[in-house]
Image (cartoon, rainbow, N blue to C red):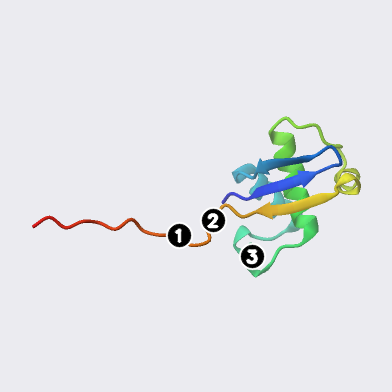
């Protein structure tokens, strides 16, 4: 499961993508399962995932999650899905 998150700590937006480690760390911290994300996800959940993913990608963030959250001016999930996906038509040979 991958989520692309756009985060701005006041110095301009940065995009980061979660990975398995990020999701497992989130499951452990919040005592839940990734399958529960379909029922809705809170801003603290997104902030935790962004914090962990940014750290993994070598982007400097405050060590303490609450300090990181205090600096956030933008946090959103980036929609990577196309709005109107199409399937390429196949041609039949006769």
Instruction: Give residue 90's position: percent from left, percent from top.
Output: 25, 56
Residue at which label 1 appears: 85
Q: Are circles 1 and 3 on residues that touch, CB within 8 Å?
A: no
Q: Are circles 1 and 2 on residues that touch, CB within 8 Å?
A: yes
Q: Is residue 12 above or below residue 91?
A: above
Q: Which mark is residue 81?
A: 2
SS of the residue under disc 2: loop
Name which residue lies at 89% across and 48% down: 66
Name which residue lies at 68% across and 61% down: 32
Q: Quadrant of residue 61?
A: top right
SS of the residue under disc 3: helix
Q: Quadrant of the C terminus?
A: bottom left
Whether residue 87 sits left or right of residue 83 in the image: it is left
Residues packed near mark 3 inside 10 Å, few (<14), some (14 to 19) or many (20 plus): few
Q: Which mark is residue 36?
A: 3
Residues packed near mark 2 inside 10 Å, few (<14), some (14 to 19) or many (20 plus): few
State how far apart marks 2 and 3 are (Cα): 20 Å
Q: Quadrant of residue 60?
A: top right
Q: Is residue 71 above or below residue 36?
A: above
Residues 78 and 24: in front is: 78
Residue positioned most to the bottom? 39
SS of the residue under disc 1: loop
Q: Are circles 2 and 3 on residues that touch, CB within 8 Å?
A: no
Foreground tag (2 vs 3): 2
Foreground tag (1 vs 3): 1
State how far apart marks 1 and 2 are (Cα): 8 Å
Residues 10 and 31: in front is: 10
Name which residue lies at 72% across and 30% down: 58
Instruction: Give residue 5's position: percent from left, percent from top.
Output: 69, 48
State how far apart marks 1 and 3 are (Cα): 26 Å
Instruction: Give residue 17's position: percent from left, percent from top.
Output: 64, 43
């Amino acid at each position: 499961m991958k989520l692309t998150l756009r985060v701005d700590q006041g110095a301009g937006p940065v995009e980061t993508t979660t990975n398995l480690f990020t999701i497992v760390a989130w499951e452990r911290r919040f005592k839940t399962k990734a399958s529960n994300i379909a029922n809705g996800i809170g801003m603290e959940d997104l902030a935790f995932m962004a914090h962990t993913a940014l750290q993994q990608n070598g982007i400097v963030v405050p060590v303490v999650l609450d300090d990181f959250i205090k600096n956030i001016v933008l946090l959103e999930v980036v929609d990577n899905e196309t709005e109107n996906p199409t399937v390429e038509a196949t041609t039949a040979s006769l």
